[in-house]
Amino acid sequence: MSLLGLMIWAPIAAGFAALLLKDPAVVRRWALAASLFVFVLAVVAALGFDPAGGYQWQYRVPWIPAFNIDYHLGVDGLSLPLVVLTAFIGMLAILTGWNTATRHIGQFFAAFLMLEGLLIGVFCAMDAALFYIFFEAMLIPMFLIIGVWGSENRVYAAVKFFLYTFLGSVLMLVAFVYLAIQSESFRITDWHAFSLSSLEQTWLFLALLLGFAVKVPMWPVHTWLPDAHVEAPAAGSVVLAAVLLKIGGYGLLRFCLPIAPDASLALDGLVIGLSLIAVVYIGFTALAQTDMKKLIAYSSIAHMGFVTLGLFILYRLATETAMLSVSGAIIQMISHGLVSAALFVCVGVLYDRRHSRNIQDYGGVLETMPIFGALFVFFALANAGLPGTSGFVGEVMVILATFQAGWWLAALAAMVVVLGAAYSLWMVRRVVFGPAEHAEVKAFQDLSGREMLILLALAIPVLAVGLWPVPLLDLIEPSVAQLIDQAQAFKAGGAP
Amino acid sequence: MDLQTLALIVVGAVGAGAVGAGLGVRVLSPKAATRLTLTGVGIAFLASVVLAVGYAQNPEPHAFTLYRWGPGDFGMKIGFLIDSLSVVMMIVVTLISLLVHVYSIGYMRGDPGYVRFFAYLSLFTLAMLLLVMADNFLLLFIGWEGVGLVSYLLIGFWYTRERAPSAGLKAFLVNRLGDFGFLLGMGALLAVAGSLDYSTVFAQSEALAQQPSPFPGLSALSLICLLLFVGAMGKSAQVPLHVWLPDSMEGPTPISAMIHAATMVTAGIFMVARLSPLFEGSEVALNLILLIGGVTALSMGLLGLVANDIKQVIAYSTLSQLGYMTLALGASAYAASIFHLFTHAFFKALLFLAAGSVILAMHHGQDIRHMGGLARRMPITATTFAIGSLALIGMPGFAGFFSKESIIEALAHSDLLLAKPAHFLALAGVAVTALYSLRLWWYVFQGAPRSTEAEQAQERDSTVVLPLVLLAMLTLVAGFGVEAFLYGGLLGDALVVHAAHDTLARMAENWNGLGGAILHGFATPAVWLLGLGLVGGYFLYAKGYADKLAPNVSRLRLILIQKYGFDVFYENWVVRAARGVADACARIGDQRTIDGLMVNGTARMARRAAATLRQVQSGVLGHYALAMLLGLIAALGYLFLRG
């Protein structure tokens, strides 16, 4: 079995095994050990990766030969960082959910392990049928995590989550089937090279866009996210925000741009417009939230707006500036994965102590939880895009590049500088600072060793990427260059 | 040692102190933290001096890159530029920071956040050093934001209070409004000049001046300069982005000295001076700078007349003096602006630290109406405060005289459209400065004590007093640098001035030495206005005419007490509008329209489905998973059949 295959199937197998384990203490350790193992494998894959070498760690066997469907895995500079992120977050999610489940503990950890394996599968699949299976199968454990271990309104949120994503993926399936029939192949790289008329591209683009836009999520198909986050247990929110949303961005850059370049060019205004609505409108919406999880959920949507903006603005930029914006979009994905995960862990820490997500139930937390308070402020600042943290890198790259496409586009995008700071720091102001007035807050205990470990583990890469993004940039740059080539290799004579 | 190593030592020493104290905030004793940070800043100061001496021997601008930060050839790097301007700024920053560190040992003694405070102080210094030493816009922006961050943390230092964290947040957000402009300015630079590296950009300044912008009548260069200046307005607290500075008084007093003297507010002034090759090419921007600076210089000085908090009065004086520095920039007298920044750093740090000494003696009372007669009880504080005030008002022979007089003269020599009104505003500001300074002095140090604290006031130990004495001495001598700064070409290799704007060159023709300048000073309108302000102040405040006059000018007083309504405007209009938009987006947009209307069907379906799917709660995982997998298989089967 290949390295990537092991990273996919080991956690899934470990998940099935977890179902059989009875003792909660054993299940927890088992799950942690399995996710640690996957993370080690991910590090090995990253260390053995040559940025200039295209798709690597490839493994291919015919699966359904009648339709040219292969079991085909591989990673390039675009997917590898996401695989490592998934393995990293998968491990921290297990730690975050350590004491969450009071019943069905085996199933709880089984769901997380299977989810991790399936997510890695999504990023490693080089065959569209395989991609689709992982993409759909991943819904099951996530649905269960929200629906079984969530809070009061969990079923509503779980079904809403499910319906939204499913609706999008049905159209995606149609697009896949069409492409497979036309090209007689399910290999994604074949589709990249397959030529299509403008009309075909437009329909394919719209179908794929809808499928992935729900995942990102983009305005106006975003309202499932705040509900899902609010109801999901903290560990579920961590995976949802850090990894699941990235599938949307990943899908756009793996499918939409290279498969339908003419349509991407023709319809880039649509995506740019929706992205800017996400930044500005959703930024304002975040400002009005009184529930911490909703606030962070809306901030996620706003931040993911930079991913879609950075990707689709490329048609309006010179090549070198396009490199800047697309690299920025990818770094923004990684950074958002780390920062939003950390913020959801922070809310989880508070929720465990006070059983409330309402901002007004807190205040003065720093008095009783100095270490937690400092870390919460740190991640809020990272969310506000402060230099020295990863949150700055992607955002600044996208905003700076966008100016070339139009000053007013950049002006709208740059509103995040004020809005992001306003909602992030306003929350911190109300929760962490000020006098501690609630008796419950006065009785808080500071972080446990486990909680501290999670937050420190997230703080380190946030700082590392913020201070020195070059190693990550070097990793993705050749693939970004190739992506830009593909996105500009117009198939229907639609060059600008 | 070469300059490069020295520069890295400066940054590294301060950084080590900041990081060490920051990470050790829970474990370090106050003593250990003091040693650590003080050593760091001390080394940085010494290295800066050595670097300055070395640079003086071979004044050749030197840029070097520590490491590449961003992609491509955009000049996004952690790179430093050592030239006369950065060397002067490094000395000012490290020296003031060193003195503030020493002063804080006594001032912050016993505070539970002592170690944290020192970590922040050093971090503040580090951010400011990065800002002044940068050789590209990216690092400039990183330092810029870093300074904003630490000011946020320091203003909100006493976080359990109700107002301090809010003041910190306000400072951060108002600064971010400015950063919005700064960031767009950088975007414009990247779009038209293709780089963020100073030297690459500066080399294109003339071409940029010819290039059109999307706005008719505005060159690309003008647009860039205007956007960048918005950033400077935020950091350097120019009207209308000044509102954070008076509130920043919520922080501990040593911080006020740091913010007002060495770091933070000087950043915007420094930025424009550093970018003189760009600003010189845009008369539109220079005129706007004149206007903003003039309005700030006069209007903020007037506010000092009605404030009753000792630190607030000094804060308004800072705002007003920043207006003067901005005026100098507008008149292309960059060297005069940096020189005023230089003298102001010393006398303003002095005034704040002396005020801190008063506040300590008053048991943290800050209302000047409760003071009085402190000159007798606190002779060193009073003497040093007097020296600072004389420098501030520009008494001939004192530091502020040389720097402010140069600015006013430069305005008189400028041919720009708005130079005349700016000159008038600057002159009027001189009288106002004298007036509020005399008022402050009289309320605090003269007359009879008006509270028991004032009767029993005492000076604190040497860590508090020593920096005062040192700063007073520096204040006395700083003004004599005027010749080197303005006419000796001290900053020549860093500043670019077009011949058409070169006000300082015109002034150099009439320059005949320090003595001549002082003698000449007595004949200038500025000094007459200064005298007028002092005499007026004496009658108003020492003789008590102010109280008699007050009812007759109540409307004027009200305008001043309400600070021209800026705070009310921001609170009632800007903040409320933002909240309104936010509410509209959340309630009408998301809840009603998208979720309520568009997703209505889906949601209702979801609710119905939820009723049937309740079994999920009972934990029958397998069933559901099985159903899903069946669906998948069906989908795959569809492929088979269609194929």
Image (spheres, rainbow, N blue to C red):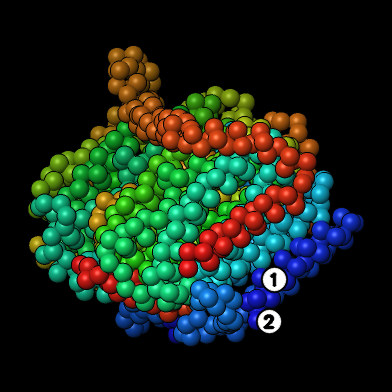
Position of residue B33 in the picture relative to residue A401 (left or right): right
Q: Which amino acid type is shown beneath numbered disc 1?
A: Trp
Secondary element at image label 1: helix
Residue B296 percent across, percent down from the top left: 29, 41
Taking the spot 33% from the left edge, 37% from the top edge, the residue there is B300
Residue A490 on image: x %, y %: 27, 72
Q: Residue at x 59, y 58 (%)?
A: B634
Measured from the top left, where is residue B176 in percent x and y? Answer: 41, 48
Give the camera-side residue of B348 and A438: A438
* Foreground of the two, B12 or A206: A206
User: To which chain does the residue with label 2 belong?
Assistant: A
Q: Are marks 1 and 2 in contact (CB under 8 Å)?
A: yes
Relative to B452, is A366 above or below?
A: below
In the rendered image, the vertical position of residue B113 relative to residue B608, given as above or below: below
User: In which quadrant will I find the N terminus of chain A?
Assistant: bottom right
Name the spot of residue B515 as percent of width and height, x first. 24, 59
What mark, if any, has residue A1 been given in the picture? 2
Q: Quadrant of residue A350?
A: top right
Q: Return the residue at label 1.
A: A9
How many other residues sit within 10 Å of disc 1, few (<14), some (14-19) or many (≥20)?
many
Mark 2 residue type: Met
Residue B291 lies in quadrant:
top left
